[in-house]
Image (cartoon, rainbow, N blue to C red):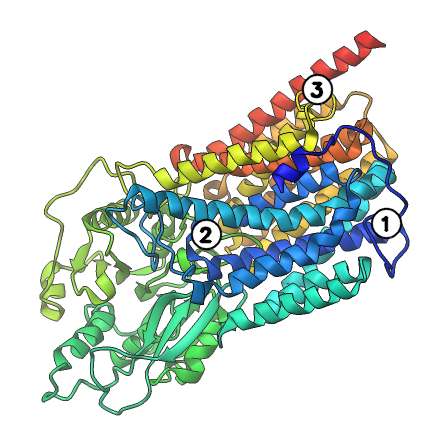
Amino acid sequence: MLDKINSLDMTAPQPAPAGAPFHNALIAADGPRMMLTTFSILALELAMIRWVGTQIRVAAYFSNLVLIAAFLGIGLGAAIGPRRPQWFAATLPILVVVVGVLSLSEPFGFVRFAFPDPTINLWGATIREQQKAGNFLLACLAVLASFWAITAVFFAMGLPLGWLFSRMEPLRAYRWDIAGSLLGVVVMSIAAWAGTPPPVWFTIAVVPVLLLHRTLINLLCAGAVVIAAAYSMSGAVFSPYNRIDIVPAVTRLGKPALERPEWELSVNRDYHQYMFDLSHASDPGAVTNETRDLVRASYEVPFRVSDKQGSAMIVGAGTGNDDAAALRAGFRHVVSVDIDPRIIALGRAMHPERPYDDPRVVPVVNDARAWFEQNNELFDVVCYGLLDSHAMFSAMSTLRLDNYVYTIEGVRAGWAHVAPDGVLSISFSVAAGEWMVQRLTRVIEEATGIEPIIVDHRYNFGVTFLVGRTLTAERVAQVFPQSGRLTHKDASLRVPTDDWPFLYLRPHTRPTAYIVVVALIALTGFSGVRAAFGAALARSRFDGHMFLLGAGFMLLETRMVTELSLLFGSTWVVNSCVIAGILVMIMLANTLIEHWQPRKIEFVYAPLTVSLLLIWTFSAGVLNRFDVLPRAALAGLIYSLPVFFAGMIFSTSLKRARDTSAALGANLCGAVFGGLLEYLSMLTGMKALTLLALALYLASMLLLLRLTGKRETVA
């Protein structure tokens, strides 16, 4: 595609006939056409974010890969749209090729393509400790190919966006643009709430394209996209977060005593858990009874070491194995928290011990951190199941490498709910090696002030960390002899915090794959930008000021989603509200600039700077000290202000732009740059992204002043 673009003179004006991107459209007015276009873009973006990582697992571990590809494609399409609007006809044909190939990822062997970098420990990912250079390069190129395939789809979808902006008054066009995106968020949120599968997501995304470009080819391609998405399901069910596959369990434990069916549950194609019947000890005469009894003991140890059997809280309860263990130990009240309602429903319907049918169990659908912050109840046992953010998708964001459950602040929030003589239990798979045991030990010790006792049961490569103010190693050894404390601690190990939540980053290494893939995306992306904007890249057509605004806003949005998730929970509802709130603030800023324009837009940078410094100062750790209502009021004020002021600057700059489509394209390409800069957080921490966003905004101001000075000199 880049070669084809390079072969054309994109800088030469080529007037397009009226309605060029559209054919036999049902809607004639430009405003509603803009709204349908951005609605389709937003819906497809969210659909691809949720779906691609389940088809190629290696792609899921590159944070924001789909989002960055979408922004780059839309930016390039918007820049070229006024000159090549007719290429929009290729949207659905390109989409059907991409979706068709990815739907066949399992027979093609793409699903389990090896992750190229052993410096990142990933649950369920295929990792080769001693991978050859050729395999490493092949894996990186596979990720890059996925990136550009997605970019090609959004390039075609972005063409009418640029064409419409070139025809309409800029702020009016932008109003319709934001309205379409906001409607897309609402509709896709409803689809997430209903637990709809991929065919529904893609139907929502392609129908607007059919309304704008009605041809037989498009109709056939749209049908093929939906069929391919349906084929990719292979019997899976979907929640707002996950693809869930359930098959009969095949283990080496032998049959359960009552011979009730047991199940294996996978999430996003990674093993998640078994639904075991551990209600009775194994038959003493069975060869495998020792293993089954070990599994039973590993689940029950947090509840057996407790001197009281009053109340327990399960974090990451899943289908109910931990709840069943608490009930077997005699606990009278069990609060069972899990973020995924579909997994709880499956546990209620299929778990052989039926723990969710017991009136002593109270299932709660919520994010763990949010529940901790929103409640004050104390428990005799607070038990963390095997939570893992790498098996969770959000409907509004892509999979992230961070994990805010196992930070010092996260564990401290759980510890605050442990009764004075209670027990905190954290189970975790430590297949990565001793460094994971060391890291979690230090996290728990710094959060609680007590050195944890480690139960080395090794079920699913797991250990259980136990902490209690009155709990002793002798008491734990009575229940599980293979237990004790670490004899050596690595003081140089970096400990996860809310500012640096990268639990899975192997210590004393560099994430080579991330560096290589980000570099490849940056280099090839620059080639795409150069092709789209032509030889005058550094001169009149490319708007550097708008580019920097896009980069700064991407980092600002990242910080908002992260911080507000820590304040109110990383649920799809919170993420939907955050994205919708951002769009509403942008709409308000755009409406203000439509009716009143500041004489000196540079003056708006002063309140923007102050508001960004407020975000940097009043992070989630500070705001979480307040009750829910004042916390919501303060967070709403603090986090809405920078979006509003940044929106004012953007709308004013868009209105003044000589080439609106090129300015919009440059802004979207800047968002790509900001998305790549986000990876620096693995080195600097998340909080520094706010200062980096501020630096980008100030750089845009300096460039704006320079451009304004040149124009005044020419005048």
Q: Residues within 10 Å of mark 2 (few under 14, many from 20)?
A: many
User: Are the two marked residues, 2 and 1, in contact with CB atoms closer than 8 angstroms?
Assistant: no
Element type at marker 1?
Answer: helix
Q: Amino acid at mark 1?
A: Gly
Q: Earlier in the sequence, mark 2 or mark 3?
A: 2
Residue 692 rendering spot, x and y as whole percentages: 52, 29
The quadrant of the image that shows the N terminus is top right
Mark pair 2, 3: CA separation? 36 Å
Q: Position of residue 638 (x, y in %)?
A: 61, 39
Tag 2 secondary structure? helix
Local crowd at mark 1 within 10 Å, few (<14), some, or many (≥20)?
Answer: many
Q: Is residue 711 above or below residue 246?
A: above
Q: Tell me where residue 606 appears, x and y as whole percent.
A: 67, 23
Image quadrant in which you'd find residue 511:
top left
249 vs 100, nearest the viewer: 100
Residue 31: image tag? 1
Residue 40, horizontal then vertical, whole percent: 71, 56
Residue 59's tag is: 2
Residue 129 in view, yes or no: yes
Q: Which label's residue is closer to the chain start, 2 or 1? A: 1
Please give the residue where the numbered disc 3 appears in the rendered image: 539
Residue at left offset 78%, top offset 55%: 36
Kind of residue at disc 3: Arg
Image quadrant for the C terminus? top right
Left or right, residue 663 beside residue 418: right
- Is 176 or 443 nearer to us in this picture? 176
